[in-house]
Each structure stands twice: as C-alpha cells, then as structure tokens.
Image (cartoon, rainbow, N blue to C red):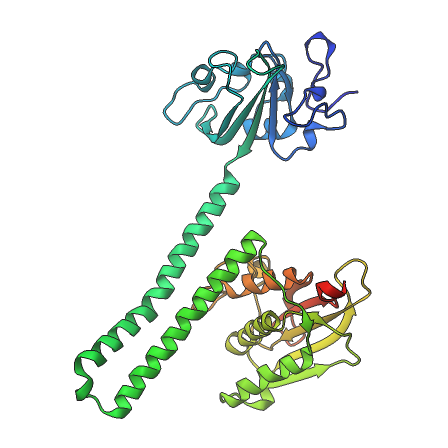
Amino acid sequence: MSVAGTSTAPEGRDARHTPLPGQGDPAGLDPDQLPDGLVVADEHGRVTCFNTAAARITAVRPADALGRSLEKALPLEDLEGRRWWQLTDPYGGLAIRVRQPERNLLLPGGREVLVAARYVRAEPLGPVRCVIVSLRDTEARRRTERSHAELIATVAHELRSPLTSVKGFTATLLAKWERFTDDQKRLMLETVDADADRVTRLIAELLDISRIDSGRLEVRRQPVDIGAAVSRHIQAYVAAGQSAGRFLLRIEQPLPALWADPDKIDQVLSNLIENAVRHGEGTVTIDVTPSASPREGEETGTSVTVSDEGPGIPEESMNRVFTRFWRGSKRGGTGLGLYIVKGIVEAHGGTITVGRAPGGGAEFRFTLPVAAPAYLA
C-alpha cells in the first residue's frame, strides 16, 4: 500500500506502519489525514514519514525530507539559537528518556513551531527504534493568546468605570453624610446600585464565556413557553417607556412543545431584542414559528426571528457578528453579548444566523430543537 507524502522505509518497510505510541501497528492510519505535522525517523535517524501537515508547516517537500537524517530534514533551533537535535541527542544520552515535552522551537527563517517528540524503544532501556515528532503551527495559539489579552483589557476597562463610581460615591457619603439632603443621598445610592448591577452583569458574562470556551455550559431543560417569554420582554420595555406600537409579536400556532433552559433563553431574547431597540429603528418584529429541527432525528423545532427597520449590518461585517468584541458601528458595551448568545443557542443543539430584514434592518434568527430533559430521553 502507498501513502501520499510518505515513501517506503529502508529494508522495504512501509513508513505508514511505523508504530505510534500506545497504538501498536496502525495499519489503517494515513499520516496525511492527521491535523498535526508528523515526522518519523527510524533507528538510524533517517526520516521514513513526513506527512502533508509537516510539509505545510515547515515548507519542506516530503520528497526532500524522506531518507535524509532527522537533523537535516528538520533543522530546529531553540529560542537561544542552539541546534535542537544536537542538544537533545535522541539516539544517545540517557536510556530512560522516552519523550521530549512540547515546546516552542524555531525553523530556518525564524518561524516558530510547537514540537514534541516520542522515543520508541523495543524494550525498556533498549536502543531507540524510532523517533516520532509532532509539529503544530503556533498561529492558532497566538490568536487564542491575543483573544485572551483583549478580553482581559476589555474587562479591565469595563470594570474601571463602575468601580470608580462606586468607590467615589461611597467614600463621599461616608465622609460627608450629614452635608447631603435625602434626595442627594438617594441619587448617589441609586447610582451605586446601578453600577453594582453593571459589574455583576460583566462577571456573569465572563463566567458564561469561560463555560462556552471550555464546553461546560450547562443546559437545564424545562418546558418553555417561548411566546410568553417574548411577551414578558416586550412588556418590560413598554413599562420602561418604549411605545407599545414599536413592537410587533407574531406567533404561528401550533408551536411544538419546547424543552430548554428558561433562564438562558431569556438571556438570548434579552440580548437580541435589546440590540434591535438600541441599534435599530422603526418597528421591532419578533416572529415565533415552528420549523425544521436543526438536530438529526427530530422533525420539528422552534424558530425565533428578531428584526428591525434600521440601517442593518454591513455585508462585510456579517461574518464577524458572533465573534468576541464585535460592536458594530456604535461603540459601548463589551461586545460579548452576541458571542454568548451563539454559545447558548449551540449548547441547546440549535443554530443562529444573521441577515438583512425585509424592512432593511438587521434580522437575527435562532432555531432550537424540541429536545427533552435527560431523564425523558
């Protein structure tokens, strides 16, 4: 059998059959299907496998690497400029070594890669039979690190303002309580209360992001009347001073029974309706309809569409709406709301999209499977 990106190893052994740690003989494994770079050298230090990902990461053709010594096919240096294979000496040195932990190393030209190695021995303390090297591009990790740095900077900025206000008003009240009238005291305490709520919301957003990123966002499913939930949000806006005529709620009956986490669905609705009210114009229309389920094995689901008649979202920004820190044309807020909305919807097994509404504004549509609680599944 032949494998793309590999060649027959010395003594007629197919490079694909080089055993991987803990897997025995992976006769069905195609190295070119691996997402990470894979380089395998035999007991003589000659490269017998150099997969497609390794070629992409190193910019070295497999044909130029196969059969060469590991040091020449994969010339690596540490961050201090020392030659890595001479430094680690995989075929010599201590016989108890079985691996090199992942670390940052440099390719010729200074490109940084993540490298880990495994030394395979025929028997404990025996000679090295082959060296297996994994390569990973650092760009994805750098993007993650930049995203975390941006998150920390955003949180620090958003926390500074309310905490400064809380500290200022409380310190003033404690120092000069008798000098203020009751109305002045009430105004300052109401400001402190509002800023404390702002800090609480920000901390809740951070916890949600942490759970979404780690895949630990819990969904506690209960029966949810989605139409009634939307009505409550509309009534809250009307009570706060918005015109009742600005909202149009259309519910197509009959709706399938929906099992979802009511608190998290409220969070999704709150964010989408608030965006339409704050950033959109004209009538905010909410359509609740039965639809095809986004999950295999289920026929029906429930869709909620929130649209407005404002300027909408520019076409070039559509693919960034659900990313962290996207704020559109208007500044303000953390830019984390829609990222969390997407995470909540997907944790329910649903989907969410953004587009242009018939009235010209933005249109957000999320669809949830009917689902059921775990004990009924």
- Front-lying residue, 5 or 177: 177
Q: Is residue 373 above or below residue 76?
A: below
Question: Is the residue 363 above or below the residue 247 in the image?
Answer: above
* Quadrant (top left, top right, bottom left, bottom right) of the C terminus: bottom right
Q: Is residue 348 left or right of residue 281?
A: right
Q: Position of residue 308 (x, y in %)?
A: 60, 77
The residue sitting at 40% across, 55% down in the picture is 152
Q: Percent from the top left, x then y, of residue 257? A: 76, 74
Please give the name of the residue rendered at 47% of the width and 17% of the height, measured from the top-left corner.
Answer: 85
Please provide percent x and percent y for residue 321: 56, 61
Judging depth in this view, the residue of 126 and 350 nearest the camera is: 126
Q: Is 363 positioned to the left or the right of 339 in the image?
A: right
User: Percent from the top left, x then y, of residue 262?
Assistant: 62, 73
Nearer to the camera, 221 or 38: 221
The foreground one among 203 and 238 is 203
Q: Quadrant of residue 362?
A: bottom right
Horizontally, residue 75 falls left or right of residue 261, namely left
The answer to which quarter of the image holds residue 118 is top right
- Quarter of the image for the N terminus: give it: top right
Residue occupying the point 72% across, 28% down: 30
Quarter of the figure with residue 373: bottom right
